[in-house]
Image (spheres, rainbow, N blue to C red):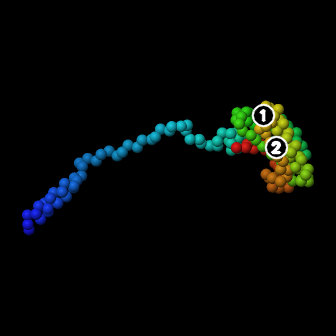
Amino acid sequence: MNKTAIAVTLASALALSACSKKAPEELPPPPQTTTPTPSGPPPQTGPIPGSQAHFAQAMQGRDTIYFDTDQYNIDPEDQAALRQQAQYMQQYADIRATIEGHADERGTREYNLALGERRATAARNYLVSLGISPDRLNTVSYGKERPIALGSDQASWARNRRAVTVILN
């Protein structure tokens, strides 16, 4: 072999041996994980305040009032539920609501639509008397078209004679 070839082989061997690494005697510690600090408020859990879900949760069933047959008067139990609704609406002054009037299946469609309207209006008027602006409240009557209880018995009819307050988002 000539001197040049030997020199190239030696240079290559030296270069390769310089690249080889020995294993360290002690491994470095694993990287530390850091939790970033939140820059804003903590994430919201549960329903958004002022939403229909939050209202329903806060009312615990008192978002609905019930009526006797062919009646639309607000009794003391209904007054308590409507007072609780008014307090919620005063706390969240930017929300609007629709009050839905419903009737049971007995009677004509026209009669039940009119009765549902009287029930919704009675609930609305009571909320207005408690200080809720009438501009924040709408009414709609569904008559017997949206029953909550399907059945032709006294218990079903009693559940369907109602006014329901629904928060608009």
Determine the residue positioned at 76% across, 35% down: 86
Extreme-bottom residue of the structure: 1
Between discs 1 and 2, the one toward the N terminus:
1
Q: Residue furthest front?
A: 4
Under circle 2, the secondary element is strand
The spot of residue 85 in percent (x, y) is 75, 37
Relative side of 70 to 34, left or right:
right
Amino acid residing under circle 1: Ile
Label 2 belongs to which residue? 139
Q: Nearer the viewer, residue 169 or 26?
A: 169
Of the numbered discs in the image, which one, if any, rests on residue 151?
none
The C terminus - image quarter: top right
Write down the quadrant of residue 53 in the picture. top right
- Name the amino acid, label 2: Thr
Q: Crowding near pointer 1: few (<14 within 10 Å), some, many (20+)?
A: many
56 sits to left or right of 35: right
Count numbered badges in the picture: 2
The answer to which of 164 and 150 lies nearer the viewer is: 164
- Position of residue 75 relative to residue 150, above or below, is above
The residue carrying mark 1 is 132
Residue at x 81% of width, y 48% of height: 159
**Secondary structure under badge 1?**
loop
Residue drawn at point x = 89 percent, y = 50 percent: 112
How many residues crowd mark 2 within 10 Å: few (<14), some (14–19), many (20+)?
many
Q: Position of residue 68 (x, y in %)?
A: 87, 44
- Image quadrant where one finds the N terminus: bottom left
Picture coordinates of residue 121 (x, y %)? 85, 41
Q: CA distance from mark 1 to mark 2?
A: 14 Å
| Looking at the image, residue 130 lies above or below residue 61 | above
What residue lies at 22% left-to-right and 53% top-to-bottom? 21
Nearer to me, 163 or 149: 163
Q: Is residue 18 left or right of residue 69?
A: left
